[in-house]
Image (cartoon, rainbow, N blue to C red):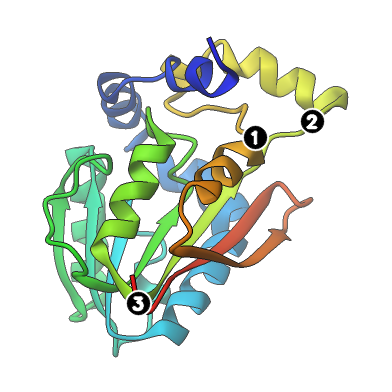
Amino acid sequence: MSAESRENATLSNADVESAYTRWAPIYDLVFTACMRPGRKAGAAAVNRIGGRILDVGVGTGLELPMFSPDLRVTGIDLCEPMLDAARRRVASHKLHNVEALRVMDAMQLTFGDASFDGVIAPYVLTVVPDPHRTLDEMARVVKPGGEIVLVNHIGAESGPMAMLEAWLGRRAASLGWRPEFSWDIIGSWLETRPDITLLERRTLAPLSLFTIVRLKRAVNA
């Protein structure tokens, strides 16, 4: 079995939905601070794109208040309790630019081709069972000339952090995400997609734990 296949086999949608149903009541308390720099960087990137934006894995909606009010935002997530928290955030912040929050599988989007000017996926690729299929779906629904913005943890290749990630990786199903996630998963997908260009790859605070990746779909796609 290839390394990618082993990683894909560690999670199922049922694992993810179950884990994030458990995480939902405390998600903001646990993850807001460490993931805020990545969410801000991702929001800044899609704010420059403008237009209609799809937020894949919107979760509790922590980045929704960071989006420009000029954007038209649709958010999707697999977990209804997480979306309930996002709906409360939309109401409390009066985010009139959020057009919809829907339960949906990131690996099987129900939107038509070229539906969005941009797609943002914050901390999603380590969660989905099949990252390549998810990337294919995001590329399908973004318009030619549009951008896909990823914020993700890229696993360490060696050293104590790699050992810790390997230990946590054996608990991926209960955690709800895949701690071991190599750049090769994204890189190998890019090699199969001549219509997608890597615009930016940059590590972020805290401690370079997360990386922002900006991809552009060719205008003539």
Q: Position of residue 20 (x, y in %)?
A: 33, 31
Instruction: Name which residue type carries label 1.
Output: Ser
To which residue does mark 2 refer?
157
Give SS at disc 3: loop
Please say if 89 is above or below 93.
Answer: above
The image shows residue 24, relative to residue 91, as above or below, that is above
Q: Secondary structure at mark 2?
A: loop
In terms of sequence position, does the residue under pointer 1 or pointer 2 come before the other? 2
Q: Quadrant of residue 213?
A: bottom right
The amino acid type found where label 2 is placed reads Glu
Assign the C terminus to one quadrant of the image: bottom left
Residue drawn at x 38%, y 77% as measured from the top left: 67
Residue 198: assigned label: none
**Label 3 vs label 2: CA separation?**
36 Å
Q: Residue at x 51, y 76 (%)?
A: 45
Residue holding disc 3: 220
- Asked if the residue under mark 2 is in contact with the one under mark 1, i.e. CB atoms within 8 Å, the reply is yes
Q: Which residue is mark 1?
A: 182
Apparent side of residue 18 relative to residue 200 in the rendered image (left or right): left
